[in-house]
């Protein structure tokens, strides 16, 4: 059956993998222990511990620091 917009599934049902940014393990996105978004990018994790570590300090693992709020001058 074809999708309403004419899109076809060429994946053959194969899993899609990402690398856990904390430990570097290969993670099947459909079976990931967790998922987080940082600055518009999605990250998948092999364990809840890796997800927690990432959420505590995402810039440590992405190389992109979290923007700090601007402080007003008095």
Image (tube, rainbow, N blue to C red):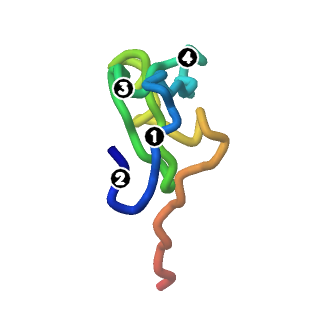
Of 10 and 36, the residue lying toward us:
10
Say what secondary structure mark 3 lies in: helix
Identify the residue under disc 1.
9
Indicate which disc, 2 or 1, sits on the residue closer to the N terminus. Answer: 2
x 48%, y 36%: residue: 43
Kindly give the residue lying farthest to the front in the view shown. 1
For marks 2 and 1, give the CA distance: 9 Å
The quadrant the N terminus occupies is: top left
CB-based contact (under 8 Å), mark 2 and mark 1: yes
Q: Which mark is residue 29?
A: none
From the viewer's perspective, is the residue at label 1 or at label 4 nearer?
1
Identify the residue under disc 4.
26
Q: Residue 30 carries which label?
A: 3
Identify the residue under disc 2.
3
Residue 72, placed above or below residue 57: below
CB-based contact (under 8 Å), mark 3 and mark 1: no
Indicate which disc, 3 or 2, sits on the residue closer to the N terminus. Answer: 2
Say what secondary structure mark 4 lies in: strand
Say what secondary structure mark 2 lies in: loop
From the viewer's perspective, is the residue at label 3 or at label 4 nearer?
3
For marks 3 and 4, give the CA distance: 12 Å
* Label 3 packing within 10 angstroms: few (<14), some (14-19), many (20+): few
For marks 3 and 2, give the CA distance: 21 Å
Residue 67: horizontal and vertical position, in percent?
53, 59
Q: Quadrant of residue 56?
A: top left
């Amino acid at each position: 059956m074809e999708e309403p917009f004419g899109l076809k599934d060429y994946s053959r049902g194969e899993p899609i993998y990402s690398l856990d940014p904390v430990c570097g393990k290969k993670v099947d996105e459909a079976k990931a222990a967790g998922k987080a978004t940082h600055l518009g990018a999605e990250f998948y994790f092999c364990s809840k511990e890796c997800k927690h570590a990432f959420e505590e300090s995402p810039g440590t693992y992405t190389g992109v620091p979290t923007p700090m709020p601007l402080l007003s001058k008095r």
